[in-house]
Image (cartoon, rainbow, N blue to C red):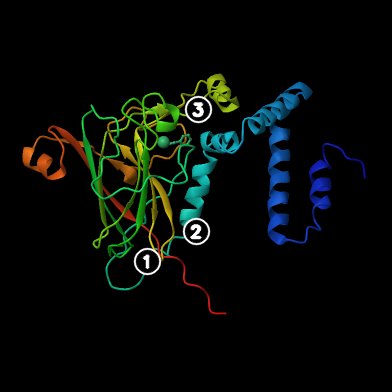
Protein backbone atom coordinates (compact mmCIF):
# COMPACT_ATOMS: atom_id res chain seq x y z
CA UNK A 1 0.00 0.00 0.00
CA UNK A 2 1.29 3.47 -0.90
CA UNK A 3 2.07 5.89 1.92
CA UNK A 4 -0.21 8.84 1.03
CA UNK A 5 -1.83 11.69 2.89
CA UNK A 6 -4.94 9.51 3.25
CA UNK A 7 -3.20 6.32 4.43
CA UNK A 8 -0.38 7.88 6.52
CA UNK A 9 -1.98 7.74 9.97
CA UNK A 10 -3.31 4.20 9.63
CA UNK A 11 0.03 2.97 8.26
CA UNK A 12 1.97 4.36 11.22
CA UNK A 13 -0.62 3.15 13.74
CA UNK A 14 -0.42 -0.35 12.22
CA UNK A 15 3.38 -0.30 12.55
CA UNK A 16 3.00 0.08 16.34
CA UNK A 17 0.07 -2.35 16.71
CA UNK A 18 2.30 -5.18 17.91
CA UNK A 19 3.78 -3.22 20.84
CA UNK A 20 3.64 -5.80 23.67
CA UNK A 21 3.24 -3.35 26.59
CA UNK A 22 -0.43 -2.18 26.41
CA UNK A 23 0.25 1.18 28.08
CA UNK A 24 3.15 1.95 25.71
CA UNK A 25 0.93 0.92 22.77
CA UNK A 26 -1.81 3.29 23.99
CA UNK A 27 0.61 6.19 24.51
CA UNK A 28 2.45 5.79 21.18
CA UNK A 29 -0.80 5.36 19.22
CA UNK A 30 -2.42 8.43 20.81
CA UNK A 31 0.75 10.44 20.16
CA UNK A 32 0.76 9.45 16.47
CA UNK A 33 -2.95 10.24 16.04
CA UNK A 34 -2.67 13.66 17.69
CA UNK A 35 0.62 14.58 15.99
CA UNK A 36 -0.77 13.66 12.57
CA UNK A 37 -3.96 15.63 13.30
CA UNK A 38 -1.78 18.63 14.26
CA UNK A 39 0.25 18.38 11.04
CA UNK A 40 -2.92 17.98 8.94
CA UNK A 41 -4.41 21.10 10.58
CA UNK A 42 -1.29 23.29 10.36
CA UNK A 43 0.02 22.03 6.97
CA UNK A 44 3.59 23.18 7.72
CA UNK A 45 5.95 24.11 4.92
CA UNK A 46 9.19 22.09 4.81
CA UNK A 47 11.00 25.15 6.24
CA UNK A 48 8.50 25.52 9.08
CA UNK A 49 8.89 21.84 9.99
CA UNK A 50 12.69 22.25 10.02
CA UNK A 51 12.25 25.27 12.31
CA UNK A 52 10.06 23.20 14.65
CA UNK A 53 12.78 20.54 14.82
CA UNK A 54 15.39 23.25 15.43
CA UNK A 55 13.27 24.71 18.24
CA UNK A 56 13.01 21.32 20.00
CA UNK A 57 16.73 20.74 19.43
CA UNK A 58 17.48 24.09 21.10
CA UNK A 59 15.20 23.17 24.03
CA UNK A 60 17.21 19.95 24.48
CA UNK A 61 20.54 21.73 24.13
CA UNK A 62 19.51 24.22 26.86
CA UNK A 63 18.78 21.34 29.28
CA UNK A 64 21.29 19.82 31.71
CA UNK A 65 21.42 18.90 35.43
CA UNK A 66 20.81 22.50 36.52
CA UNK A 67 18.61 23.86 33.71
CA UNK A 68 15.60 21.96 32.36
CA UNK A 69 14.20 23.83 29.37
CA UNK A 70 11.82 20.93 28.50
CA UNK A 71 10.19 21.25 31.93
CA UNK A 72 9.95 25.01 31.40
CA UNK A 73 8.30 24.38 28.01
CA UNK A 74 5.85 21.98 29.64
CA UNK A 75 5.20 24.65 32.32
CA UNK A 76 4.43 27.52 29.91
CA UNK A 77 2.25 25.27 27.73
CA UNK A 78 0.16 24.43 30.81
CA UNK A 79 1.02 20.74 30.49
CA UNK A 80 2.75 20.47 33.90
CA UNK A 81 -0.33 21.82 35.68
CA UNK A 82 -2.70 19.77 33.49
CA UNK A 83 -0.86 16.60 34.56
CA UNK A 84 -1.16 17.75 38.21
CA UNK A 85 -4.90 18.41 37.79
CA UNK A 86 -5.54 15.02 36.16
CA UNK A 87 -3.63 13.20 38.90
CA UNK A 88 -5.48 15.12 41.63
CA UNK A 89 -8.76 13.90 40.08
CA UNK A 90 -7.47 10.32 39.81
CA UNK A 91 -6.69 10.34 43.54
CA UNK A 92 -9.96 11.98 44.66
CA UNK A 93 -11.59 9.61 47.12
CA UNK A 94 -8.32 8.42 48.57
CA UNK A 95 -8.39 11.69 50.53
CA UNK A 96 -11.23 10.53 52.74
CA UNK A 97 -9.83 8.47 55.58
CA UNK A 98 -13.29 7.34 56.65
CA UNK A 99 -12.08 7.37 60.23
CA UNK A 100 -14.99 9.44 61.50
CA UNK A 101 -18.15 11.23 60.38
CA UNK A 102 -16.59 14.62 59.65
CA UNK A 103 -16.47 15.94 56.10
CA UNK A 104 -12.92 15.34 54.86
CA UNK A 105 -10.89 18.48 54.14
CA UNK A 106 -9.81 19.09 50.57
CA UNK A 107 -6.24 17.97 50.08
CA UNK A 108 -4.00 20.97 49.30
CA UNK A 109 -3.48 21.34 45.55
CA UNK A 110 -0.23 20.08 44.16
CA UNK A 111 1.73 22.43 41.86
CA UNK A 112 4.89 22.58 39.72
CA UNK A 113 8.25 22.27 41.51
CA UNK A 114 10.09 24.93 39.50
CA UNK A 115 13.84 25.16 38.88
CA UNK A 116 14.88 26.90 42.11
CA UNK A 117 14.43 24.06 44.59
CA UNK A 118 17.69 22.77 46.08
CA UNK A 119 18.07 19.15 47.11
CA UNK A 120 18.97 19.92 50.69
CA UNK A 121 17.52 23.06 52.29
CA UNK A 122 19.24 24.20 55.51
CA UNK A 123 17.65 22.61 58.61
CA UNK A 124 15.99 25.29 60.75
CA UNK A 125 14.27 25.47 64.12
CA UNK A 126 10.64 26.58 64.34
CA UNK A 127 10.49 30.38 64.38
CA UNK A 128 13.85 30.84 62.64
CA UNK A 129 14.26 33.76 60.26
CA UNK A 130 14.98 32.60 56.70
CA UNK A 131 15.68 36.21 55.66
CA UNK A 132 19.46 36.18 56.17
CA UNK A 133 19.94 39.67 54.70
CA UNK A 134 17.64 41.87 56.81
CA UNK A 135 16.56 45.46 56.33
CA UNK A 136 13.11 44.71 54.91
CA UNK A 137 9.65 44.60 56.47
CA UNK A 138 9.35 41.32 58.39
CA UNK A 139 6.77 38.71 57.54
CA UNK A 140 5.57 35.86 59.77
CA UNK A 141 4.14 32.62 58.37
CA UNK A 142 2.37 30.23 60.71
CA UNK A 143 0.99 26.92 59.52
CA UNK A 144 -0.05 23.41 60.31
CA UNK A 145 0.17 20.10 58.50
CA UNK A 146 -2.96 17.97 58.84
CA UNK A 147 -4.51 14.93 57.21
CA UNK A 148 -7.92 15.09 55.49
CA UNK A 149 -9.85 14.48 58.73
CA UNK A 150 -8.05 17.45 60.30
CA UNK A 151 -5.73 15.42 62.54
CA UNK A 152 -2.42 17.23 63.08
CA UNK A 153 0.68 15.51 61.71
CA UNK A 154 3.65 15.81 64.07
CA UNK A 155 7.17 15.27 62.75
CA UNK A 156 6.36 16.27 59.16
CA UNK A 157 9.13 18.08 57.30
CA UNK A 158 8.19 21.35 55.59
CA UNK A 159 10.74 22.42 53.00
CA UNK A 160 10.33 26.13 52.19
CA UNK A 161 11.94 28.26 49.48
CA UNK A 162 11.19 31.72 48.15
CA UNK A 163 12.76 34.69 46.40
CA UNK A 164 13.58 37.95 48.17
CA UNK A 165 11.71 41.27 48.08
CA UNK A 166 13.42 42.07 44.76
CA UNK A 167 12.32 38.83 43.07
CA UNK A 168 15.62 36.91 43.17
CA UNK A 169 16.40 33.49 44.63
CA UNK A 170 19.71 33.09 46.50
CA UNK A 171 21.19 31.06 43.60
CA UNK A 172 20.45 33.93 41.19
CA UNK A 173 22.07 36.63 43.33
CA UNK A 174 25.23 35.21 44.95
CA UNK A 175 26.71 38.72 45.32
CA UNK A 176 23.85 40.03 47.48
CA UNK A 177 22.39 36.93 49.14
CA UNK A 178 24.14 34.21 51.15
CA UNK A 179 23.38 30.68 49.97
CA UNK A 180 20.37 29.40 51.95
CA UNK A 181 18.68 32.81 52.03
CA UNK A 182 14.91 32.31 51.73
CA UNK A 183 15.19 28.58 52.40
CA UNK A 184 14.55 26.30 55.33
CA UNK A 185 13.67 22.74 56.27
CA UNK A 186 11.34 22.79 59.28
CA UNK A 187 9.81 19.95 61.29
CA UNK A 188 6.28 20.25 62.67
CA UNK A 189 5.76 20.15 66.45
CA UNK A 190 3.49 17.76 68.41
CA UNK A 191 0.43 19.63 67.15
CA UNK A 192 1.50 19.57 63.52
CA UNK A 193 2.40 23.26 63.60
CA UNK A 194 5.29 25.17 62.03
CA UNK A 195 6.22 28.83 61.82
CA UNK A 196 9.01 30.98 60.49
CA UNK A 197 10.00 34.56 59.86
CA UNK A 198 10.84 35.87 56.40
CA UNK A 199 10.06 38.74 53.99
CA UNK A 200 7.19 38.99 51.53
CA UNK A 201 8.52 37.64 48.20
CA UNK A 202 8.10 39.60 44.96
CA UNK A 203 6.78 38.54 41.56
CA UNK A 204 9.56 37.61 39.11
CA UNK A 205 10.13 36.37 35.54
CA UNK A 206 10.81 32.71 34.72
CA UNK A 207 14.16 32.21 32.90
CA UNK A 208 13.81 33.87 29.47
CA UNK A 209 17.35 33.47 28.09
CA UNK A 210 16.52 30.24 26.21
CA UNK A 211 14.16 29.04 23.46
CA UNK A 212 11.13 29.15 25.80
CA UNK A 213 11.84 32.85 26.40
CA UNK A 214 11.96 33.37 22.61
CA UNK A 215 8.58 31.63 22.29
CA UNK A 216 7.05 33.93 24.93
CA UNK A 217 8.52 36.97 23.18
CA UNK A 218 7.27 35.94 19.73
CA UNK A 219 3.78 35.28 21.11
CA UNK A 220 3.74 38.48 23.20
CA UNK A 221 3.21 36.57 26.44
CA UNK A 222 4.74 37.99 29.63
CA UNK A 223 7.14 35.72 31.60
CA UNK A 224 6.05 36.65 35.15
CA UNK A 225 5.00 34.54 38.10
CA UNK A 226 3.00 36.19 40.90
CA UNK A 227 4.71 36.41 44.31
CA UNK A 228 4.73 33.04 46.05
CA UNK A 229 6.38 30.80 48.63
CA UNK A 230 7.13 27.16 47.70
CA UNK A 231 6.56 24.21 50.05
CA UNK A 232 7.29 20.48 49.97
CA UNK A 233 5.56 18.70 52.83
CA UNK A 234 6.65 15.17 53.75
CA UNK A 235 4.66 13.56 56.58
CA UNK A 236 5.18 9.95 57.66
CA UNK A 237 2.52 7.69 56.06
CA UNK A 238 1.38 10.43 53.65
CA UNK A 239 1.98 11.31 50.02
CA UNK A 240 4.62 14.09 49.74
CA UNK A 241 3.04 17.36 48.61
CA UNK A 242 4.68 20.04 46.44
CA UNK A 243 2.73 23.29 46.52
CA UNK A 244 2.83 27.09 46.72
CA UNK A 245 1.17 29.90 48.67
CA UNK A 246 0.48 32.98 46.57
CA UNK A 247 0.37 36.59 47.80
CA UNK A 248 -3.16 37.82 47.12
CA UNK A 249 -2.32 41.39 46.08
CA UNK A 250 0.62 40.45 43.83
CA UNK A 251 0.80 41.63 40.22
CA UNK A 252 0.19 38.74 37.77
CA UNK A 253 -1.97 36.81 40.28
CA UNK A 254 -4.47 36.30 37.43
CA UNK A 255 -1.93 35.48 34.71
CA UNK A 256 0.80 33.22 36.13
CA UNK A 257 3.18 32.31 33.27
CA UNK A 258 3.06 28.64 34.39
CA UNK A 259 -0.67 28.47 35.34
CA UNK A 260 -0.12 27.28 38.95
CA UNK A 261 -2.48 29.70 40.74
CA UNK A 262 -5.51 28.12 42.34
CA UNK A 263 -7.86 30.21 44.56
CA UNK A 264 -7.34 27.86 47.52
CA UNK A 265 -3.59 28.63 47.47
CA UNK A 266 -3.96 32.43 47.56
CA UNK A 267 -3.50 34.15 50.93
CA UNK A 268 -3.85 37.73 52.16
CA UNK A 269 -0.50 38.74 53.64
CA UNK A 270 -2.08 41.15 56.15
CA UNK A 271 -0.20 44.03 57.76
CA UNK A 272 -0.18 43.78 61.57
CA UNK A 273 0.46 46.81 63.82
CA UNK A 274 0.07 45.15 67.23
CA UNK A 275 3.36 45.54 69.22
CA UNK A 276 2.44 42.65 71.57
CA UNK A 277 1.96 40.24 68.70
CA UNK A 278 5.18 41.52 67.14
CA UNK A 279 7.09 40.92 70.37
CA UNK A 280 5.63 37.39 70.56
CA UNK A 281 7.05 36.61 67.13
CA UNK A 282 10.29 38.52 67.69
CA UNK A 283 9.66 41.03 64.89
CA UNK A 284 9.11 44.78 64.65
CA UNK A 285 5.87 46.57 63.72
CA UNK A 286 4.35 46.79 61.22
CA UNK A 287 4.87 43.22 60.00
CA UNK A 288 3.07 41.09 57.41
CA UNK A 289 1.36 37.86 58.39
CA UNK A 290 -0.10 34.84 56.56
CA UNK A 291 -1.36 31.42 57.57
CA UNK A 292 -0.88 28.10 55.80
CA UNK A 293 -2.87 24.97 56.55
CA UNK A 294 -1.41 22.20 54.40
CA UNK A 295 -3.61 19.09 54.01
CA UNK A 296 -1.84 15.94 52.81
CA UNK A 297 -3.24 12.66 51.55
CA UNK A 298 -2.57 9.35 53.34
CA UNK A 299 -0.52 6.85 51.34
CA UNK A 300 -2.87 4.42 49.57
CA UNK A 301 -3.21 1.19 51.55
CA UNK A 302 -1.11 -1.64 50.12
CA UNK A 303 -3.23 -4.37 48.53
CA UNK A 304 -2.97 -7.78 50.27
CA UNK A 305 -0.70 -10.15 48.35
C1 LIG B 1 9.29 28.86 40.24
O1 LIG B 1 8.35 29.28 40.84
O2 LIG B 1 10.34 28.81 40.87
C2 LIG B 1 9.16 28.45 38.79
C3 LIG B 1 8.23 27.50 38.45
C4 LIG B 1 8.11 27.10 37.11
C5 LIG B 1 8.93 27.67 36.14
C6 LIG B 1 9.86 28.64 36.51
C7 LIG B 1 9.98 29.06 37.84
FE1 LIG C 1 9.26 30.29 42.50
Residue at left offset 49%, top offset 24%: 221
Query: Splitting the image into 4 quarters, where does residue 129 fall?
Result: top left
Residue at left offset 70%, top offset 40%: 35
Badge 1 vs badge 2, beta-carbon distance below 8 Å: no
Question: Which residue was labeled with disc 3?
Answer: 207
Which mark sits nearer the N-terminus, 1 or 2? 2
**In x, y percent, where is residue 237?**
41, 66
What's the distance in space between the residues labelled 1 and 2, CA to CA? 13 Å
Labelled disc at residue 251:
none
What's the distance in space between the residues labelled 3 and 1, CA to CA? 39 Å
* Element type where label 2 sits in the image: helix
**In x, y percent, where is residue 107?**
37, 56
Which mark sits nearer the N-terminus, 2 or 3? 2
Residue found at the very far bottom of the displayed protein: 305
Horizontal side, residue 171 vs residue 124: left or right: right
* Element type where label 1 sits in the image: loop
* Element type where label 3 sits in the image: loop
Question: Which residue was labeled with disc 1?
Answer: 96
In depth, the one of 32 and 203 nearer the eye is: 203
Rendered view: 74 above or below 213: below
Question: Which residue was labeled with disc 2?
Answer: 90
Residue at left offset 16%, top offset 37%: 283
Amino acid sequence: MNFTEETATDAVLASFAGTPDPRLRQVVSAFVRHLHAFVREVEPTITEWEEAVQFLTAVGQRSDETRQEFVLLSDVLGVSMLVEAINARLHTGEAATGSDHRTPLDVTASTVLGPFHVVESPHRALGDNIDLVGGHQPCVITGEVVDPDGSPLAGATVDVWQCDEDGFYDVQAPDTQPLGNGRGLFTTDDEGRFWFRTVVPRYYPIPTDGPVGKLLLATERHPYRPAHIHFIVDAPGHVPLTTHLFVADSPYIDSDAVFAVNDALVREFVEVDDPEKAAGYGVTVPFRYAEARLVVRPLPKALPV
